């Protein structure tokens, strides 16, 4: 039963409400801005057979503090443990996303090339769309090959805001 427990809390930062979830192994979910607890619950019900939700503001304080510091421009990376579950392909894509430097962008094709699956650009897009850790696994740094903003689970407004917030950082492309 312990492997079905999702500890959660609400983070309020800069007027946004973000739900985060963690297992005993690490942070497993960060929601989009103002998307509600239902977003976390729907994700958990896909991952766990019978998720048990326990609100734990104190236990998730370190995650919340680092996320708030990031959103306030005082942190460029995270040092807490994560608990990512996905297919080997998804995990490879999410690892590649985690290697995109703060303030940089790359395309879906760049990610496909990085994981040596050049023909799998659409599958890369699907894996990015399934990323449960917005901001932490920085899928907001992926844009279309022509430079246009593309879909984002947290919404395009959130993606634009995160990219603008990071724009003062590194500008080199992912490689």
Image (spheres, rainbow, N blue to C red):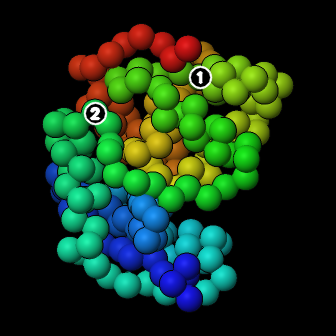
Residue 37 picture location, percent across and down? 41, 74
Who's the residue at 32% across and 45% down the image? 79
Horizontal side of 126 relative to 105 (left or right) equals right
* Residue 144: numbered disc: none
Q: Residues within 10 Å of mark 1 (few under 14, many from 20)?
A: many
Name the element at disc 1: strand
Q: Residues within 10 Å of mark 2 (few under 14, many from 20)?
A: some
Q: Is residue 40 above or below residue 56?
A: above
Name the element at disc 2: loop
Q: Residue furthest right?
A: 119
Image quarter where the N terminus lies is bottom right
In the image, 66 versus 103, the foreground residue is: 66
The tag earlier along the polypeptide, 2 or 1, is 2
Residue 37 visible somewhere in the drawing:
no
Image quarter where the C terminus lies is top right
Who's the residue at 37% across and 13% down the image? 171
Residue 110 picture location, percent across and down? 63, 20
Residue 21 visible somewhere in the drawing:
yes
Image marks 2 and 1: residues in contact by CB distance under 8 Å: no
Mark 2 and mark 1: Cα distance apart in space: 20 Å
Horizontal side of 15 relative to 142 (left or right) equals left
Q: Is residue 88 above or below residue 169?
A: below
Q: Quadrant of residue 18?
A: bottom left
Residue matched to label 2? 76
Residue 78 picture location, percent across and down? 32, 43
Q: Nearer the viewer, mark 2 or mark 1?
A: 2
Residue matched to label 1? 107
């Amino acid at each position: 039963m312990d492997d079905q427990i999702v500890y959660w809390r609400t983070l309020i930062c800069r007027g946004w409400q973000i739900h985060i979830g963690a297992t005993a192994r690490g942070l497993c979910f960060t929601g989009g801005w103002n998307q509600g607890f239902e977003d976390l619950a729907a994700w958990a019900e896909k991952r766990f057979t019978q998720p048990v939700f326990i609100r734990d503001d104190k236990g998730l304080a370190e995650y919340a503090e680092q996320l708030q510091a990031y959103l306030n421009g005082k942190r460029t990376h995270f040092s807490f443990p994560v608990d990512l579950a996905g297919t080997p392909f998804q995990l490879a894509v999410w690892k590649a996303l985690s290697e995109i430097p703060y303030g940089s962008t790359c395309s879906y094709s760049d990610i496909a090339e990085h994981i040596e699956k050049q023909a799998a650009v659409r599958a890369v897009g699907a894996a990015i769309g399934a990323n449960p850790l917005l901001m932490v696994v920085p899928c907001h740094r992926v844009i279309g090959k022509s430079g246009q903003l593309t879909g984002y689970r947290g919404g395009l407004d959130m993606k634009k805001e995160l990219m603008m917030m990071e724009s003062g950082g590194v500008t080199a492309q992912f490689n």
